[in-house]
Amino acid sequence: MQKGLFITFEGADGCGKTTQLNLLAQYLEQNGYDVIKTREPGAKGLGEKFREILLNYDGDVSDRCESFLFLADRAQHVDMIIKPAVEKGKIVLCDRHTDSTLAYQGYGRGLDLKQINMLNNIATDGLKPDMTFVFDVDIETSNKRVGKEKDRMESAGDDFFTKVRNGYLQIAKMEPNRIKVIDSTRSIDEVFEDVKMYIKNALK
Ligand SMILES: Nc1ncnc2c1ncn2[C@@H]1O[C@H](COP(=O)(O)OP(=O)(O)O)[C@@H](O)[C@H]1O
Ligand SMILES: [Mg+2]
């Protein structure tokens, strides 16, 4: 059986990850592909418990604890959902994954990048996305799209946003073959045209 594809969607809150993931899922399904939509944190099952803590807990969370919670969620997700699906030949579209930990806990919170890479590798058991989209937006665009109801991560402030954004751009420079940066201040349709172009190439 043909091996599937694992595609991740990254970028700041409000950049359009979920919007583009849904559009791509619909497009691929219409073209006969078997697609799974999933997310981190908070895939079906145990992931939902992790999501509840990570996004809604209103007490203090240490930076290292936060990292380990994301990584624990990821390990469960890779083993129980992502790997089995890719092995069955499905296309897995995942809203946030390893690059979020690098961008947020590494570049954003200032934890050691080498250590995060190592921990990411343990959490994923070495599985790497075949392709990653980074939807790049400025802070004004993000704020406008997220609106007033912000979760714990979204409330971290402007300085944090800038660090995370620059982090994503750094990561993309290091792995240009895997990571595609898309200017997502444009319209939903314009952004999706770029997504389709990259996917068509990947499916050739
Ligand atoms: N390119 C775009 N232009 C304008 N609005 C957008 C665009 N992409 C997404 N949105 C809107 O912005 C909000 C956040 O988008 P969403 O896809 O949920 O972002 P994310 O999942 O990255 O947080 C939604 O209301 C969505 O409809
Ligand atoms: Mg989303």
Image (cartoon, rainbow, N blue to C red):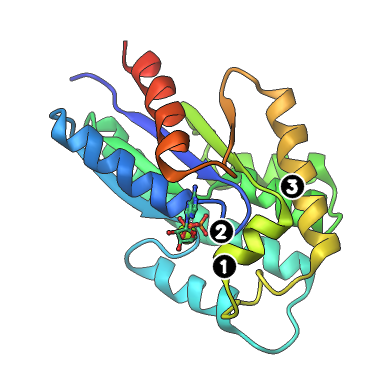
Q: Is residue 124 left or right of residue 196?
A: right
92 or 67, nearer to the observer: 92
Locate residue 5, reporting x and y percent: 35, 28
Locate residue 157, reporting x and y percent: 79, 69
Marks 1 and 2, how far apart in space?
Answer: 5 Å
Marks 1 and 3, how far apart in space?
Answer: 16 Å
Q: Residues within 10 Å of mark 1 (few under 14, many from 20)?
A: some
Residue that lies at the very extreme toward the top in this rendered image:
204
Where, by quadrant of the figure, is residue 29 drawn? top left
Q: Which residue is mark 3?
A: 165
Q: Secondary structure at mark 1?
A: helix
Q: Residues within 10 Å of mark 2 (few under 14, many from 20)?
A: many
Q: Secondary structure at mark 2?
A: loop
Amino acid of disc 1: Val
64 or 52, nearer to the observer: 52
Q: Which residue is mark 1?
A: 146
Image position of 111 with respect to 64: above or below: above
